[in-house]
Amino acid sequence: MDNFYNAPLLSRILKVKHKTDSMGALRLIREFVPEGLREKAKKNMKAGEVAFSTTKDLSVEVWMDKNVVAMISTFHQVKIGGIEKYGYYRYKPQVVLDYNLSMDGLNHKDQMLQAYPMEKVRKIIWYKKLFRRLVNVSIHNSFVLFNHNRTQVIGNREFRLQLVKELLQVCGPRAIPRPIEPVAPAAPSQMHLPVKNERSQRCKMCHAAKVRRTTVWRCSTCAVNLCIEGCYIEYHK
């Protein structure tokens, strides 16, 4: 666990009541940390020096690296281990080696998430930032599972682009229908309504066809006399 959460009381409760072992970094200001270790850490410890306090089910170790490193564990014995790095063999408490080994995956995850800072947006309310963080971590977990046991793995960027394309196919924006523009009704003067004359007059269409025929109807717009049947419709085509 991270030192933000770790405390001797919490570790003991997990061990005794829930049968769960734990280890992690520890802040020496926590309650129930042995006073002797606090005093030891305040003094000028030499590089590589280790101070510890143990009980039946709990051990607290203070190790001097470049700075003071405090660790707590419910399943480690006080033991020194070694690791080779850059051609040098370095000695560290075994609990530190195991903790670093378990944290490698977490640190690698944080490095990959930093390339896609979905939640790092200014002036965004806290619960939206939390939601974006959870979505980002979920995408990373999906990426890890997708490449698990695959002979040909794909990169993080390629995976995210493919994910976006597939999500757009399922949940993409639908085409918005264009609103139908209402057609303005024609003015009465443009409707070519037939009106009745006081007396019959020659039909213009019949006169053009050299047919003598009279009618009492004329077009109110065109002011042309037309037979109401046939000629009226034919004239206005």
Image: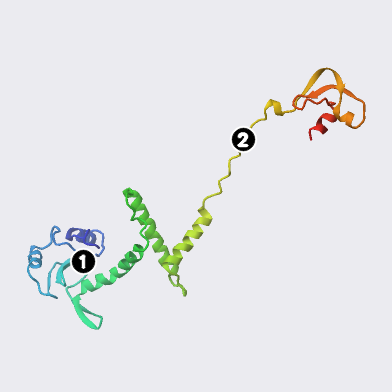
Considering every residue shown, the one lying at the far bottom of the view is 87
Of the pair 10 and 173, the residue shown nearer to us: 173
Q: Which mark is residue 74?
A: 1
Left or right: 25, with 153 as reference point? left
Mark 1 secondary-structure assignment: loop
Of the pair 124 and 143, the residue shown nearer to us: 124
- Residue at the image point whose x is 47% and y is 74% from the top: 152
User: Residue 120, position in %: x, y?
Assistant: 33, 56
Mark 2 secondary-structure assignment: loop
Q: Residues within 10 Å of mark 2 (few under 14, many from 20)?
A: few
Of the pair 51 and 87, the residue shown nearer to us: 87
Type of amino acid under label 2:
Pro
Q: Residues within 10 Å of mark 1 (few under 14, many from 20)?
A: many
Q: Which mark is residue 4?
A: none
- Residue at the image point whose x is 34% and y is 63% from the top: 114
Question: Image quadrant of residue 197?
Answer: top right
Of the pair 209 and 144, the residue shown nearer to us: 209
Type of amino acid under label 1:
Thr
The quarter in which the N terminus is drawn is bottom left
* Residue designated by label 2: 182
User: Residue 35, position in %: x, y?
Assistant: 8, 62
The quarter in which the C terminus is drawn is top right
Left or right: 196, with 122 as reference point? right
Question: Image quadrant of residue 50?
Answer: bottom left
User: Residue 48, position in %: x, y?
Assistant: 14, 76
Question: Image quadrant of residue 57?
Answer: bottom left
Q: Earlier in the sequence, mark 2 or mark 1?
A: 1
Considering every residue shown, the one lying at the far right of the view is 211
